[in-house]
Amino acid sequence: MTMSNTGGRRRPPTIHDVAREAGVSRGTVSRVLNGGHYVSPTAQEAVNAAIRKTGYVVNRHARSLITGRSDSVGFLLTEPQERFFEDPNFNVLLSGCTQALAAHDIPLLLMLAGTKDERRRITRYITAGHVDGVLLVSSHSGDRVAEELREAGVPLVQCGKPMGPGSKVSYVAADDRDGARDMVRHLLSLGRRRIGVVSGPLDTPGGVDRLAGYKEVLSEAGVEIDERLIASGDYSRASGEAGTELLLERAPDMDALFVASDLMAQGALAALRRAGRRVPEDVAVGGFDDSSAATEADPALTTIRQPYDRISTEMVRLLLAQIGGEDPAAVILPTELVKREST
Amino acid sequence: MTMSNTGGRRRPPTIHDVAREAGVSRGTVSRVLNGGHYVSPTAQEAVNAAIRKTGYVVNRHARSLITGRSDSVGFLLTEPQERFFEDPNFNVLLSGCTQALAAHDIPLLLMLAGTKDERRRITRYITAGHVDGVLLVSSHSGDRVAEELREAGVPLVQCGKPMGPGSKVSYVAADDRDGARDMVRHLLSLGRRRIGVVSGPLDTPGGVDRLAGYKEVLSEAGVEIDERLIASGDYSRASGEAGTELLLERAPDMDALFVASDLMAQGALAALRRAGRRVPEDVAVGGFDDSSAATEADPALTTIRQPYDRISTEMVRLLLAQIGGEDPAAVILPTELVKREST
DNA sequence: CATGCTTCTGTGAGCGTTCACAGTAGAGAA
DNA sequence: TTCTCTACTGTGAACGCTCACAGAAGCATG
């Protein structure tokens, strides 16, 4: 009574063991493992049975050594820590990508590059070929990390439009401009005319496009664009609060506010409350993202929904295509207005 | 003028190239790469120069193939998605572990196991030996994932005390009981006597210990323990809100409230506001964690600080030790009372 | 001078795959 | 029959590294 099969970390079965068990050669087993073309049904069957019986799982290192692929991808976040800690959007994206990759049996390596040093270390790691490709999330464009990786020939898909217009970086983004237009139209439809905006960072296309949508709709509606009603932030809660305070000071008659992220909108709500303004009675507030921050807010935020689930699956699809040799591509996804208590 | 050195994905240098360049053998290069014992200073120097010159980086797959190690670890989160989306503690932990591992040049594989299916898939992946060890974060104890992995001989460190008392699982935890004691003592010191509690889930040691600390201090102080003042939640915002509503209904004279997580405390604040209670005048509120939720809350939460930075570094230290062959161990870290506006 | 010890170095083997290639068997065409 | 073509199978050679081992060189000890 001394046996114990589990736990004892015995040598795992190899492709050789499977081949012997199935009465075929290594090559045939390998072919079954990789798609099963040019394999007779009989052999196919025998190999599968042998795999089940032996409990064989492929040794990814051996495979990678010869294929040159690592069959893993990196998820690179070039944001300061605090942003990662406070913004649930990152989690949604991270979770979505992890799951989409899991369907292809590809593990996700998490790479957090908040500082310059980390960015350098991680860039080196990536260009050394330790991952097949990179999913990049970076809302500010200060770093040239995307361009660097592309120049090094690393397959890459960015979340959100990249900066340079000529940049050949793959990306997936929501239709920022259109979303902003919808929100501002909605605020106009409530009869508001003194509509303020706290935009995203203006060194990113996302920030620029949402602001452009705002201006466009106001112009179409014949409402004067008042620079005192325009502030910008960096998507963080604190910057939304600060931006709103600034607007209140410069334009006390503001009766609506479009905030370019839900998190900033939370800050805006806090600033408005402190200033004694009721939402939505005195000031109607619209956010952007439809993250959990929108429903947690009090009052719950009217917002523009970004289809994060589709964004992550598209990012993964584009990356795998690129790893497979296809050219970079861009995908723009539609947004949707979600009405709640704040307007 | 047709050359272009970057981008052209040429065959990367191998240990062979470095050896030739340095005028030594593969073995010597390998020794330099792995600690440099039994290598003459001369050779050491020559090899390092050659590495710099050739831009050599080790091929991890080739190394792993022979060592049997993958030199990577998994970060396993067995929580439903929504919890991951709303609770910033996970991000703090994730970031801390990623960085602590980076110092050892070990990549982190993210594994999200919100559902049973995912749990099964990931367990298989792990037991197949694709990672050297696992950092496990799971606040509810329903799943036997920790035990399963341990039985399979996978090095494992859990965040938070595991369930079974006889369980030989490594873990790192804050001193839950002591933290709870500090908070309740603090509330008593404010002159409050009708102190309610929204505990964590009672099927986890963390939840149980914090509740025990609460009861202990009340008993010592000669304050009657009133079951109507005791509710429990699952650390989520919504459960904190619901728990607080329950308490207000059962014990309207409650003048203080200890909530076992900051997120639940946010919910508690919302419930209290809706009930027209002022914080801290009518009800003093204390949280637990000192997460970003505590400072974001309005009013800012008095809370018990968990040293997340140390928790993650200790988790990594323990895991690497275990991978290195050491026995599982437990680390309990001290907490600290942080006073803010809510008390 | 032999012996042992320590420090250092090179060499062959092998880790578990995939890939290219050669080869076999069977079907159909000439 | 012979040839060609297709469908399938087995084999050796990598892939880039580490590890065990053998051996060399230097030095002290008997």
Image: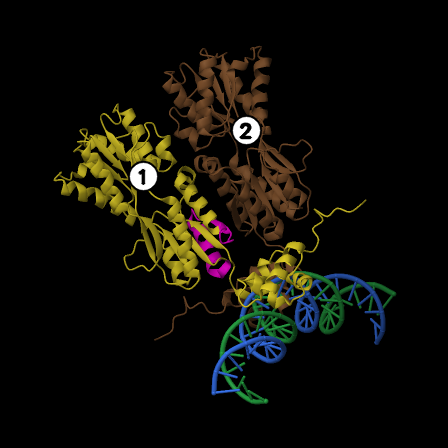
Chain colours: A brown, B yellow, C green, D blue
- Residue extent of the magenta highlight: B102-130
Q: Quadrant of the C terminus of chain A?
A: top left
Taking the magenta stretch, the answer to whether it contains residue B120 is yes
Q: Is residue A191 left or right of residue B17?
A: left
- Taking depth in this image into account, of B252 and A50 the one nearest to the observer is B252
**Which residue is label 2 attached to?**
A335
Is D8 above or below relative to B180?
Answer: below
Measured from the top left, where is residue A119 in percent x and y?
56, 43
- Taking depth in this image into account, of C4 and A277 the one nearest to the observer is C4
Marking on residue B261: 1
Is B99 above or below relative to B328?
Answer: above
- Taking depth in this image into account, of B230 and D23 the one nearest to the observer is D23
Query: Chain letter of disc 2?
Result: A
Q: How many marks?
A: 2
Taking the magenta stretch, the answer to whether it contains residue B142 is no
Q: Secondary structure at mark 2?
A: loop
Query: Chain letter of disc 1?
Result: B
Q: Amino acid at mark 2?
A: Thr
Is A270 above or below relative to B192?
Answer: above
